[in-house]
Amino acid sequence: MFDQSHLRGRIVAATMKLASERPWRDVTLLDIAEATGVTLVDLKNEFATKSEILAAFTRSVDDEVLRRAPRRESATSPRDAIFEILMTRFDVLAPYKEALRSIAGGSRAPDPAFVCTFLASQHWMLQAAGIDTSGVRGGMKVSGLAGVYASVLRTWLKDDDPGLARTMAALDRRLRRGERAMSNVEDVKAGLRRIAEMFASVCRPRRRPSDVSPESGTPRAEETSGSGI
């Protein structure tokens, strides 16, 4: 999955191997440089932190998932489509499960750069499922899927069943819950629109009968003089 003809790919591969062999908190940048067979200067020119290496790993996973993503059929529901995409992602991650267990167990709060990569990853998973991510509603979908994926990933890390029954059950449950949440949001938005339209109708200025000259049916002069009141 990593292009090891390039230094960046070799660094990412070496990092994941080290993470599978020891606790992530014990893996240093010097360890990674030595495992890659380069100097710290060479490593520094590619990555400044371990989080940046994990971000590069995440982008490589995204690329592989997009290559493997099944074509969505018109009859496939959005929930079923994203279910297939995320299960494809777990297939791609399978060779790195031990490393990811180490990383999950030794990571502190993620830095902002990795959070941005993580959210971008969810955007591409939704795109692969044929789900629009534009606008505010699209942003809500990305954030929602990020929560779903992070939760199910924890289940997957503990699921040693070759059929991943627990993972699939958790993913299906969380996606159904997310689908209901989005539906509720749409109901709330529709209700707010109806309320806004009602108030707009009630509060719209209406011309009083006294504002119209009985002789001509036109506004009285004093009411159109531009007094500014």
Image (spheres, grey):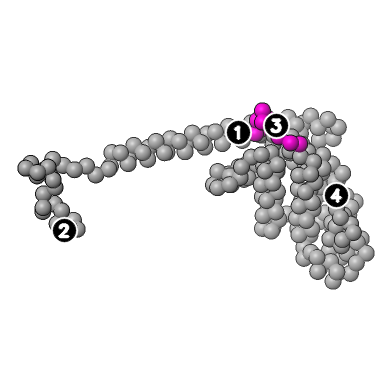
Q: Residue at x 22, y 42 (%)?
A: 206
Q: Is residue 198 above or below residue 117?
A: above
Would residue 34 appear left or right of 82 to someone viewing this image? right
Of the residues under marks 1 and 4, which one precedes in the sequence?
A: 4
Residue extent of the magenta highlight: 70-79
Classify mark 4: helix, strand or loop.
Answer: loop
The residue that mark 4 highlights is 1
The residue that mark 3 highlights is 73
Residue 56 vs residue 153, the one in the foreground = 56
The residue that mark 1 highlights is 179
* Residue type at the position of mark 4: Met
> How many numbered circles does the render carry?
4
* Residue type at the position of mark 2: Ser
* Residue type at the position of mark 3: Glu
The residue that mark 2 highlights is 227
How many residues crowd mark 2 within 10 Å: few (<14), some (14–19), many (20+)? few
**Inter-mark Cα distance, 2 to 3:** 64 Å
